[in-house]
Image (cartoon, rainbow, N blue to C red):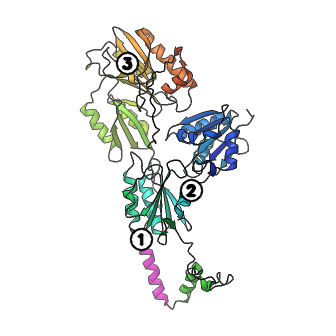
Amino acid sequence: MSLRGKLYIVGFGPGDANHITYRAVEAIKASDYIIGYKTYVELIKNLLNVKQKIISTGMTEEVSRAQAAVKLAEEGHQVAVISSGDSGVYGMAGLIYEVLVEQGWHKESGVEVEVIPGISAINSCSSLLGAPIMHDSCTISLSDHLTPWTIIEKRLEAAAAADFVIALYNPKSGRRTKQIVEARRILLKYRSPNTPVGLVKSAYRERQSIVITTLDNMLEHEIGMLTTVIIGNTSTFVYDDLMITPRGYQRKYTLDREVQPLKPHERLKKEAEPWSLENLESKKRESKKTPFQLACEAIAMLDRKPNFVVEKTDYKPVFEFAISPGVANKRFTPEQFKLLAEVVGHEGRMDYSRDHQLRISIPTNHPEQIVEQLSNVGLLVMPVGDVITVKACDFCDGEKKDSIPYAEKLQQRFGGKAVPKELKIGINGCGMACYNAVMEDIGIVYRKGKFDVFLGAKPVGRTAHPGQLIEEGLEAEKLVELIEKLIVEYKENAHPNERLFKYFKRKKVLAGYKYQDNEPKLNLQPIPCAD
């Protein structure tokens, strides 16, 4: 380990070994830690060695990856943060710098940072389609998780009206299906239905797929998160299953002649460029208009509204939180719902979750006032994200009340506390365990005055399984102490974004309890994640 750490922010291209740069390979091999989305780690596994430590996480966990990378580099390690394509195009480069800036980093005194470029999707996909981006082009992401849709709409309008060749990233996912439909609607306002469109999925990877279609018919084909959509401009054409966009020199070059009508020294003369800005201004100066006519035109231009205006809007930060009537109590009062409706209003959003909570999102500059209002009417207000959530049954509508005080004590002690990855504690009030607490990260079942404790369930996925029984008949007064012991060890030693069951499986021992492998032994094909 060197005295001064270094961060390599690596773009490794489409994933094919032939399209990764020599410098990217060097950086990956020189690193102590490799950090990236698990699919990306899989794509470069042939470059890794047994001495390197791998931190792979799921989609949407970029911030945690960036924070972990910076921390490790500050400790003196060589760290490679990997992105497919180019790390500076919807990759990790900007986010790494944001984390560094937040911590007061400076180039001269802080950890060394090297951004290593890679082939972006617009380039790799275009090479498979032919030559669709030979003239001015742009990239637009259709994911509105981090960018308001109103802004994306304006960018689509602007790019379509300006006749750019457009590459759409993140066009569609399992939850985002309307955005690509809306994008096509906007583009059809400015482009012919016959405009060539290329759909490239998994460029230069095993499941590569290439489709050339039209703007009118593009939605008839499969489009997903792994697809890049390239939409031609008004001069793009298709020849022999290739998309080609001319360089725009048709008036200077005659392609069907061996000898060009203009000599090289003549092509750059003003008279050979009637479309140029300089010539257009000359024509305006030569116009024989009276001062009155020019004044009228100027007034008309002031009154004319542009086709699209990017307005500067004062966006409020979005406050996200969860509420419930309590751990054991499942009943909202009319007063609580009335206040909720007023607080959420037309700009906010309210969703019911499977954790017996309402998830609230509200644009506001004063979150503390909202918390105070809701708490004053008896609502339990909790943070969301990578925190501890305490879930419980309704204790048979409160009839089986003996374990309720323990559930409330666990909520007071652990509810909302930050952890490496979201952690759920499930509590059942009797041995029937009908609430399914055994399918939570930590499951607790009250039985005959004592507790059975289960650890490390995997609640979702094709290899889902219940938690492992680690304590049977635990004395009630020892429950909180045991749960705290489990959480503290997990919190101190787990990787960023590592679920409890993954940590237990990796370490084999947690708080003295040995891991027992009870996962189903199935031969399953990997499935792509949806954002």
Helix or strand or loop: what does disc 1 sit on?
A: loop
Mark 3 or 1, closer to the camera? 3
If the image is split into quadrants, where does the C terminus sit?
top left
Measuring from the top left, give residue 330's x and y in whole percent: 29, 26
Q: Do the residues labelled 3 and 1 touch (CB within 8 Å)?
A: no
Q: Is residue 404 above or below residue 370?
A: above
- In this figure, what is the number of numbered marks? 3
Residue 400 seen in this snapshot: yes
The part of the chain drawn in magenta is 287-307
The three-letter code of the residue at mark 3 reads Ala
Chain-order first, disc 2 or disc 1: 2
Query: Could you say which is closer to the camera, residue 102 or residue 402?
Result: 402
Q: Residue at label 3?
A: 407
Residue 207 spot, x, y in % from top left:
49, 48
Q: Does the magenta stretch include residue 29?
A: no
Residue bearing mark 2: 124
Label 1: how many Cα within 10 Å (few below 14, some 14–19, many 20+) = few
- Gap in Å between the C-alphas at discs 3 and 1? 62 Å
The numbered mark, 3 or 1, whose residue comes first in the sequence reads: 1
Type of amino acid under label 1:
Lys
Q: Which residue is drawn at 64% across and 82% down?
A: 267
Is residue 103 in view? no
Residue 125 located left or right of residue 373: right
Q: Nearer the observer, disc 2 or disc 1? A: 2
Circle 2 Cα neighbour tier, 10 Å, few/some/many (<14 / 14–19 / ≥20): some
Q: Which of 172 and 447 is in front in this view?
A: 172
User: Looking at the image, which is closer to me, 263 or 340?
Assistant: 263
